[in-house]
Amino acid sequence: MAVSNSNVDVTGFIIAGGRSSRMGIDKRTITIGGVTLLERTRDLLRSTLGKEPILVGDNFPEDTSSCLRDAAPDCGPLGGLVAALEFCPSAWALIAAVDLPYLSTDELFRLLHADRSGFDVLTLTSDGRPEPLAGLYRAATAPYWRYLLKRRRLKLSEGLMGLRCGLVRVDKGSSALLNINEPRQLRALPK
C-alpha cells in the first residue's frame, strides 16, 4: 500500500521499553524471520507513515536521538504513552508496541483511514476489547494520561474508559494483535 497524504497529521511511536521480566530477555532483540521485533516494528511504521517513527522507552542501551525516554520509569506502557503524547508534534500519535510481531500495514491503514471525528482514541480490536498499544491517540489527551500517571493508575485499558474511544476491527482470524510476553508464547508462534 502507498503512503497516504492524510497521515501528515500523524507521528509514529514505538513503545519499546520495559524490563521484559516475564520474557526473561529483551523483547526488542527477539528475531522472527531473521528480523528483530524492534526492526520489524520500525519498518512497519516507516512504511505506513512514510517517516521515521520515534522509539519510546526507559532502558535503551544505545544513545540515539530517535529515542524518547518514558515520562516516568517503571510505569509500564503508560510512561511511554505520556512521553509520546507530550512530545508529539502532530495532532495524532500512532502508537505501536514492539511485541506485536504480526501487526501489518493493512491493519494500520485501516486504523489511519477510520473516521476519527468524535473520538480521542481509535484502537484495533479482534474481540471487542481495545488493544491500547495498537492505536491512534489524539495528542491533546496528554494531560489526561499525565493525570493518570501521577496517580499511578497505570492500566491503559482502564484509562481508555475515560475517553471517547473507537474500535477498528481486524479481520476475523487475524494474528495482528497477538503479542508475546512469555517464552511459551514465543515458542508457540507459527514458524
Image (tube, rainbow, N blue to C red):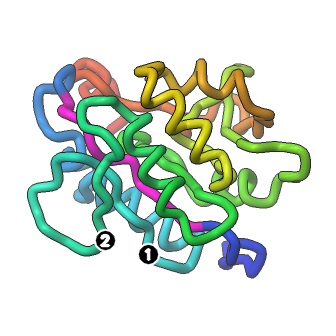
Where in the figure is residue 123, as x and y percent of width and height?
Answer: 67, 39
In the depicted structure, whether residue 8 falls above or below residue 110: below
- Residue 166 colored magenta? no
Amino acid type of the residue that numbered disc 2 sits on in the rendered structure: Ser
Q: What element carries label 2?
A: loop
Where in the figure is residue 77, as x and y percent of width and height?
Answer: 40, 35
**Residue at left offset 59%, top offset 58%:** 93
Where in the figure is residue 35, as x and y percent of width and height?
Answer: 26, 58
**Residue at left offset 58%, top offset 47%:** 142
Image quadrant of residue 74? top left
User: In the image, is 135 to the left or to the right of 65?
Assistant: right
Tell whether label 2 touches label 1 (CB within 8 Å): yes
Instruction: List the residue tagged with mark 1.
Output: 52
Q: Is mark 1 on a helix, strand or loop?
A: loop
> Which mark sits nearer the N-terminus, 1 or 2?
1
Image quadrant of residue 26? top left
User: In the image, is 124 to the left or to the right of 64?
Assistant: right
In the depicted structure, whether residue 140 falls above or below residue 72: below
In the depicted structure, whether residue 185 falls above or below residue 190: above
Amino acid type of the residue that numbered disc 1 sits on in the rendered structure: Glu
**Residue at left offset 56%, top offset 43%:** 134
